[in-house]
């Protein structure tokens, strides 16, 4: 169990580099070093190559997901808790008197889903280690399913699920990693000793590790640049900014921590949920709002506000949640 002082140092050490990278991305955009023309090709590289390599590198050899029950817990809770969070955010949007066509659906999606990717990965990895990081990717598979099914139907008002969008690099890499671990074939991709050259598995795994290491730093830099573009896109609304922060950073963290406390989930999944409870809103709803006729400006307000406020709340939630769950 993390002690209060030591835990605060560990969490701050994990969190601050992420926010520094976001800030660096914003500054580089402002200076013209990172241009908008670079966004799409860089994101394609990250999403289709670097991120899948990172996922495989962390999943392969991880005992935390070797049991089928652990995998089912991870995917199941990732899906169920995201859908329930949408429900809570929808009720909050009603309490804030947001109407359909005026931001209610976009607010629900934005406040209802936490950052489960590039910002969460380095925090989980530094606070809990490789086992929890592997479980994070399994959990994220459930979150992705919830977003691209219930989330899309919510924001679009359509009952059609865009199944093709679920067939992507990260999803395929999670499924491939689970197959390798479940079958025991991941042993052929062990990193081995530094001087080991007699097997192709070790060098191949090392190359995969090198590629994966670049995923979240590059992605977070581009995220910071995109946030700089979005600032000022729509005049801020106090109801949306304050409401989004209360829902995403107060109400839903308590809900996620309570689920982690009282459900008989694997320890590695409880560790993931502690970090997920502390995360600000994800940026995916901004894209979905643009694609499916929502209000991107509402999503931008929620994302930027929760990201800024989470710099203060995130360490507190992780430290307090860790102590409450006796992790």
Image: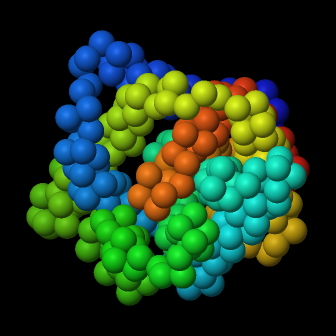
Above or below — where is 126 with respect to 176?
above
Above or below — where is 59 with respect to 298?
below
Q: Residue at x 82, y 50 (%)?
A: 97
Above or below — where is 126 with respect to 80?
above
Q: Residue at x 44, y 25 (%)?
A: 228
Q: Residue at x 12, y 58 (%)?
A: 197
Q: Position of residue 178 (x, y in %)?
A: 42, 77
Q: Is residue 63 visible?
A: no
Q: Is residue 197 visible?
A: yes
Between residue 311 and residue 32, name the one nearer to us. 32
Between residue 32 and residue 263, name the one nearer to us. 32
Q: Position of residue 143 (x, y in %)?
A: 56, 66
Between residue 133 and residue 103, name the one nearer to us. 103
Between residue 273 and residue 42, name the one nearer to us. 42
Query: How many numbered marks are there?
Result: 0
Among the 4 quarters of the image, the one containing residue 3:
top right
Among the 4 quarters of the image, the one containing residue 91:
bottom right
Look at the image and name its color scheme.
rainbow
Q: Residue at x 36, y 71 (%)?
A: 165
Q: Position of residue 274 (x, y in %)?
A: 72, 52
Q: Residue furthest top?
A: 31
């Amino acid at each position: 169990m993390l002690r209060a002082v030591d835990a605060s140092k560990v969490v701050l050490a994990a969190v601050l580099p992420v926010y520094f990278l976001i800030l660096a991305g914003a500054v580089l955009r402002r200076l013209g070093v990172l241009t908008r023309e670079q966004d799409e090709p860089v994101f394609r590289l990250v999403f289709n190559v670097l991120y899948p390599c990172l996922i495989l590198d962390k999943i392969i050899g991880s005992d935390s997901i070797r049991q089928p029950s652990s995998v089912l817990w991870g995917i199941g809770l990732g899906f169920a808790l995201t859908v329930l969070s949408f429900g809570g955010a929808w009720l909050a949007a009603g309490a804030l008197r947001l109407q359909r066509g005026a931001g209610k659906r976009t607010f629900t999606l934005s406040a209802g889903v936490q950052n489960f990717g590039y910002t969460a990965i380095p925090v989980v990895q530094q606070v809990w280690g490789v086992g929890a990081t592997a479980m994070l990717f399994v959990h994220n598979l459930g979150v992705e399913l919830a977003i691209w099914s219930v989330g899309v139907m919510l924001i679009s008002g359509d009952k059609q699920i865009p199944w093709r969008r679920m067939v992507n690099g990260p999803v395929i890499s999670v499924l491939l990693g689970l197959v390798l671990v479940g079958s025991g074939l991941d042993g052929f991709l062990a990193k081995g000793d530094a001087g080991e050259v007699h097997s192709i598995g070790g060098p191949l795994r090392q190359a995969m590790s090198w590629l994966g290491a670049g995923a979240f730093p590059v992605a977070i830099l581009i995220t910071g640049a995109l946030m700089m573009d979005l600032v000022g896109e729509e005049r801020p609304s106090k109801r949306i900014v304050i409401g989004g922060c209360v829902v995403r950073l107060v109400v839903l963290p308590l809900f996620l921590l309570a689920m982690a406390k009282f459900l008989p989930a694997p320890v590695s999944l409880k560790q993931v949920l502690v970090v997920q409870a502390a995360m600000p809103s994800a940026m995916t709803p901004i894209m979905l709002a643009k694609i499916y006729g929502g209000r991107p400006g509402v999503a931008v307000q929620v994302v930027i506000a929760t990201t800024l406020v989470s710099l203060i709340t995130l360490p507190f939630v992780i430290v307090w949640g860790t102590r409450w769950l006796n992790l």
